[in-house]
Image: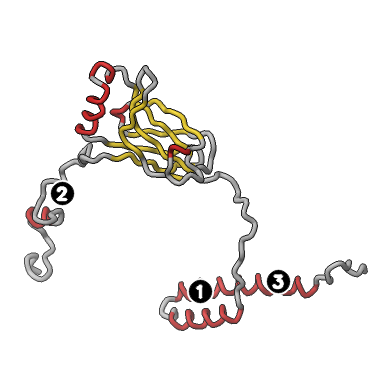
Amino acid sequence: MDQNSGSDFSRSPDQELGKFIIDGTTDVLEPSKPLPETYGDNRLVILARDPLWFFTYWEATPDRLDTLRNQVGPDVWQKGQAVLRVYDVTDRDADISRAERSFDVDVTYDARQWYVNVPVPGRSWIIELGFRFPDGRFLALLRSNRATLPLGAVSSQTDSRWMIVNISEWEKMFEVSDHFSRGSAEIAKMMAQRWEFLRSVFSSSSSALSKAPPSGQEEPKA
């Protein structure tokens, strides 16, 4: 059979590159071009990792840095330490002025990402990236979103409501699913096994309840 006849799925280089073209441009979307290190944004983002740690990454434009540098002067700027100021804003919305606690984490600004350890799980946090100077001043460069870390323990809520399963409804569902799954023996077998398991669980529960003595009475002894 002629390889050039029928269905020929070979692609030319231009067709292959066309997969990466959006709005007629290929500057950023060429498959061999690496992702940029920065995107020209001003942002500070925090993401929960576990109950006691969150991850943060940031980016600031040169104009934003220059504005802060001009505010303190070049001499004082050289003495500044980049820090993440961490605010506990649990039950405080996003108002950092009413934060329950705050602490600083010294960072390397050029790292552009950091892991932060917090003292208490299950709290909500907002951070500011800025510079702390020898005279005690702190100038914020960026502010993050608010993130809530998980509790890391069993929930204290005990008022959960469980769904009551109606056996007759399960029977109807099984009959319908069996009708539509006859074309697949594997699916039908799986559904049958699941149904038998559920029916045995409910029949065992019903049997145990029917044999249980009334409340406040002891079982008769043999």
**Residue 29 disc label:** 2
In percent of the image, x 89 and y 66: which residue is there?
Answer: 218
Q: Secondary structure at mark 2?
A: loop
**Near-viewer residue (112 or 9):** 112
Q: Where residue 154 sits in the image (x, y, percent)?
A: 60, 49
- Are the residues flagged by discs 3 and 2 in contact, CB closer than 8 Å? no
**Residue 79 disc label:** none
Counting residues from the start of the chain, the first of labels 2 and 1 encountered is 2
Front of the two marks 3 and 2: 2
Q: Where residue 75 sits in the image (x, y, percent)?
A: 25, 16
Gap in Å between the C-alphas at discs 2 and 1?
48 Å
The residue indicated by pointer 3 is: 204
In percent of the image, x 51 and y 73: which residue is there?
Answer: 191
The residue indicated by pointer 1 is: 189
Gap in Å between the C-alphas at discs 3 and 2?
61 Å
In the image, residue 159 above or below residue 88 = below
Tag 2: amino acid: Leu
Tag 1: amino acid: Lys
